[in-house]
Image (cartoon, grey):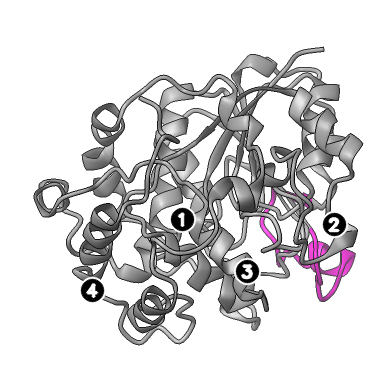
Amino acid sequence: FCVHAVQWTDELCQAQESLMNSLPEYSNNRARKMTKAKFQASVSRFPCAEGPSSRECLGMHRCRMLPSWSTNREEILQLMPDFLELWWKRPIKLNTWGMLFPHQFGFYWFLRQLQPEVVIENGVRRGLTTWLIRQAVPDVKIFSFDPGLASFAGRKQKKHDVLLYYDPNATYYLGGSYRCGKEAEQRHLWPRGIKRFQDWSTCDWSWANKDKVLILFDDHMNIGERVAQMRKLGFIHALYDDNHPSGATNFATPHDACDFTNPRMYAHESETLTSSERLATYESLAAYWEFPPVLFHPVIAAAWINRFMRINDTLRNCILSELSPMPLIQTVGQLQQYNLTTIAFDEMAGYFWLVWLKIRSG
């Protein structure tokens, strides 16, 4: 199952475009990031067959030559019914600025496969991924870190800044703009189990069985720094959520660490990896595997990223030509078989190359 040997032919693109367009849209969603109108406009402007090749744009993606996860689409989709049963009961229906359906399913799948004893969650947002961890592995120890959460449910803040799901059995390290600092803690405005934020790498993990720990990085931090921290502390398994193509973000992603051959078109030079950092990060990886999208069309990535970044046509074409794993769903029959016809277009469009990283020991 060579997930990266995908040729984005006109037939594949047209099939995925048709399936995406068959999905409904959110109603009354003011925070909508991706719409069918934007998608269709992108398709007409940047057809799949056009644009530079992946090698010309992204150079040699060495990480995709590393060992990967041994599975296939049929095995992955076996967990879709279980996931959907949970997903319709999720406590946060609109996970603004957080994981959406493709990555939520991928995260759930990895949790079920790895069965970790400990999950270190970097990036909490509204709490949906914390809930998902608890559902997938009920007895797991959860440590949740987020420097940006500023309020708990009920306090007057923007909705996407409010922690809407709180796990009483998890340990939280939250920071940001607490309104009252210690005074807030003294007044018990925050539940027990919430501590002042510190980076996960500064905590004492000597008690943990490192083979049974999964670290989620949904924190938009430099991948070189995170991999170096993991290797120093002896951790092995990580998931990196926002694995954007180079040049589309203000932080270095695993994609950045995997290219050795091409001058980069970085959006923010201060956040990129140096040549030595890129090499050190790559040499720290024992395995690399991008979880496949449920549905995907190459222009989805361009339309999403164009929402946040001012990027030129050359970079956008490079994003379009970036080879992605083969989509899990490829026919109308499969869409109906797995009861995915009512998943909102906006949810299904949220795919950013969720990747599992296995770190070398020593």
Give, as a three-letter code, the residue at label 4: Pro
State the residue position of label 3: 314
**Figure check: 38 above or below 211:** below
Image quarter of residue 169: top right
Q: Mark 4 vs mark 2: give the one in front.
A: 2
> Which residue range is magenta in the image?
175-195
Foreground tag (3 vs 2): 3
Which tag, 1 or 4, sits closer to the chain's start?
4
Q: Is the Cβ of the residue at disc 4 closer than 8 Å to that at disc 2?
A: no
Does label 4 or label 3 sit earlier along the sequence?
A: 4
| Badge 1 amino acid | Tyr
Secondary element at image label 1: loop
- Where does residue 159 sit, x and y in percent of width and height? 57, 77
Q: Quadrant of the C terminus?
A: top right
Instruction: Report which residue position mark 1 lands on.
Output: 351
- For disc 1, the neighbor class at 10 Å (few under 14, some 14 to 19, many from 20) is many
Label 4 belongs to which residue?
24
Disc 4 on helix, strand or loop? loop
Give the amino acid at mark 2: Glu
